[in-house]
Image: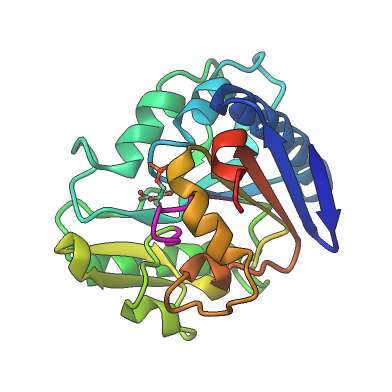
Amino acid sequence: MHKSSTHSHSIIQNTPEQVALAARNWFVSIAIMSILQRDRCLVALSGGSTPKRLYQLLAELPEGLIDWSRVHLFWGDERNVPSDHPDSNYRMVREALLDRIVGEKPVVHAIPTNGNTPYEAATSYERTMRSIAGSSPFVFDIVLLGLGDDAHTASLFPETAALKVTNRWVIENEVPKLNTTRISLTAPILNSSRNTAFLVCGESKQWALGKIHSAERNATLYPAQLIRPIGDLWWFMDEAASNIE
Ligand code: 6PG
């Protein structure tokens, strides 16, 4: 099923595998067009478990379909762990995608957690992004996002300080409920995106999806409501997640 409104599209598939396949086709078409138009494709990857299958499918594309050497991979957020830690979003992408791409590799910009405090990692990463933007505005061609059961996205968790930050692109965000500090891109830079997709699977996401799409505007409680990109917004969901009252 496909529903569209201005800039927003909902794609509902029967299974998580079909969600990953639809998102792969979406990713390929945008990456190819971005490279044709601007000779590069800037991507913010989501962490978590949902996008892993998409990353595996992208690694299995025919060699050369995407000119990966023109693709810059960023992360929308990262845990405060070394890059080889089981909880690392970088490690998940390395195993699912980077180690498995045949031929040209993408340009990888991992959030530098190794040996840095969350503040050091966040400020260093923002410098990297600003240097790549140069004198032009930084606009992602693709932003991939997941959705937490509590309606968080990236590491923008309910009632945390990062939700109100507008003067930084990358922030160290203390998350009391997880007893940790995460590194996250902030809503303003995530919204600077031509094509944004949420990948949402499983019935545990029903509550969050219902809240986000309800008339109840409360980004403090439902941070995914902060995602209002300048370009198109796609929701790739399975039946289980989308079955909201
Ligand atoms: C992370 C992600 C986070 C994730 C959601 C959904 O670092 O974990 O950035 O925002 O997308 O928590 O996670 P699942 O895909 O595992 O349900």
Q: Is residue 102 left or right of residue 239?
A: left
Residue at image position (56%, 70%) is: 225
Q: Is residue 209 left or right of residue 236?
A: left
Residue at image position (49%, 84%) is: 166
Q: Is residue 14 left or right of residue 167?
A: right
Q: Is residue 137 above or below residue 178?
A: below
Is residue 46 visible to us here?
A: no
Residue 183 image offset from top left, x and y in percent: 31, 63
Q: Quadrant of residue 233?
A: bottom right
- The magenta region covers 144-153
Q: Is residue 84 above or below residue 110?
A: above
Q: Toward the viewer: 29 or 9? A: 9
User: Was residue 180 drawn as part of the magenta stretch in this picture?
Assistant: no
Q: Toward the viewer: 191 or 16? A: 16
Residue at image position (71%, 32%) is: 28
Assign the magenta stretch its main secondary structure: loop
The colour scheme used here is rainbow
Is residue 237 visible to us here?
A: yes
Which residue occupies the extreme front position in the image?
A: 245
Residue 207 image offset from top left, x and y in percent: 48, 56
Residue 113 image offset from top left, x and y in percent: 23, 54
